[in-house]
Amino acid sequence: MGLGWSSAEERQPLLPPPPPQQQQPQRRPQPRGPAGGPAVPTAVPVRRLAPLAGRVYGRRWLVLLLFSLLGFAQGLVWNSWGPIQNSARLAFGFSGWDIALLVFWGPIGFAPCFFFMWLMDKKGLRVTVLLTSSLMVLGTGLRCVPVSDLEIRKKLIHGGQLLNGLAGPTVMNAAPFLSTTWFSPDERATATAIASLLNYLGAAGAFLVGPLVVPSPNGTSHLPLVSQSNAEHIKDRIEAVLYAEFGMVSLIFSAALAYFPSRPPFPPSVAAASQRLSYRRSFCRLLSNFRFLMIALAYAIPLGVFSGWSGVLDLILTPVHVSQVDAGWIGFWSIVGGCVVGIAMARFADFIRGMLKFILLLLLSGATLASTWFTLTCLTSVTHLPLTTATLYTSCILLGIFLNSSVPIFFELFVETVYPVPEGITCGVVTFLSNVFMGVLLFFLTFYHTEFSWFNWCLPGSCLLSLLLILCFRESYDRLYLDVVVSV
């Protein structure tokens, strides 16, 4: 089960209290039969204790599918503008500051993160998911309002991106809560990986959809239907993408409104049925737990830097003469590879429990090497390393694979470390920290967007710091301990 079990004193509050001892009843004289012999005993019903085994339902996969599609749509809408930033500048008059701000609305939307954590803890998944999807419908609808005045249109687009950013706390935090509520212990890591990584896959879809549907001003699009590159045609193609995203989000909202239960009739495990800490006590436990703060920083710093870097990848690769289409493919395959490897790693963690720290060490070591390779390649005038499309593709894709696949492993380790703190609160705190680092980075980018070498160096530095924090971390598996010991 791993080397870092918590101490017996830490595990004791997790176990159910022992049954109260019943006083031995006083022995009464045995009644006699009519012939003086002993009376014939009557049958006494014996109460049997129900086994502490959970029950899973086939509908859990439908719930997982709806939540994952919601996360996919949110990531797709958030990353709509970065991959087509050159086209958006021509069609809507966006500046470099506008492009950075459109991505910046994602971390800004995490400002009410603690409200969504409270709502999920008190009202359950259904209310939280319906509120989140309604915000996305309103946000994507604002971006489609046909206004001829470009200044008003830009404000509506910014407002729509903000409303979509407000959906971020739910789609990025609720995956471990959903997996614990609906899935058995040997499926939890896999469910967490699917529910959390589909949001990243949506961002990858933006790298694919945007550059292939919207023509680039320099004529690099490969589709014959978008060979023209005038501003009006580019604007029409962007609006077609906005309408399609609005329709997709509306369809997901309608499906969730029709069927999305908060919880199954019976819990799937002992941990799912156990009592959790209150909202206030949870924050006190998290802020006073030094081990949790270590892995929270190990997650928040590299993932926050990488998320901000991915959102403006086209902007970063433009100075090294990488086209909008090539930048889109690099971003697409880096995230898709991370999703595939992340789900595979989570499935491995479900089969061989207690290996979360070891998996993270492997992934962060690879991320440090890949980010260093990419950064040195971009400094070709200093390092004289070959700057080719193949090297950029390989280094960026490897970096995305290693970092994106670490997300569900981190989430599972967070929950195991601080259990019985509710999953939504735990993951909400770490994703809020990640968005703080991402927001600070993008804030500096709005002022220093003429030269990007400092941005690239943030990647290997953050990955190396995270690797050192994980090395010093002592793992524990309190939730798994409860499921294994109590259910036996």
Image (cartoon, rainbow, N blue to C red):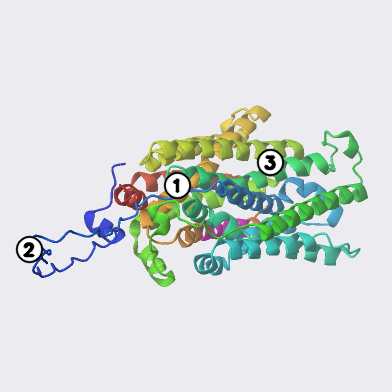
Q: Is residue 375 visible?
A: no
| Pointer 3 local density, CA inside 10 Å: few below 14, some 14–19, many at least 20 | some
* Secondary element type, mark 1: loop
Residue 323 image position (x, y, % from top left): 75, 37
Q: Which residues are magenta?
A: 432-444
Task: Answer left or right for 406 relative to 147.
Answer: left
3D distance between C-alphas at marks 1 and 3: 44 Å
Lower position in the chain sequence, tag 1 or tag 3: 1
**Circle 3/circle 2 CB separation < 8 Å:** no
- Figure check: 128 above or below 309: below
Nearer to us: label 1 or label 3: 1
Give whichever of 225, 444 is nearer the camera.
Answer: 225
For the point 50% across and 57% down, the residue is 265
Give whichever of 90, 55 is nearer the camera.
Answer: 55
Residue type beneath disc 3: Leu
Q: Which mark, by number, is residue 240?
A: none
| Pointer 1 local density, CA inside 10 Å: few below 14, some 14–19, many at least 20 | many
**Circle 1/circle 3 CB separation < 8 Å:** no
Lower position in the chain sequence, tag 1 or tag 2: 2
Give whichever of 151, 430 is nearer the camera.
Answer: 430
Q: Which mark, by number, is residue 184?
A: 1
Q: Which mark, by number, is residue 317?
A: 3
* Secondary element type, mark 2: loop
Judge whether residue 125 is colored magenta. no
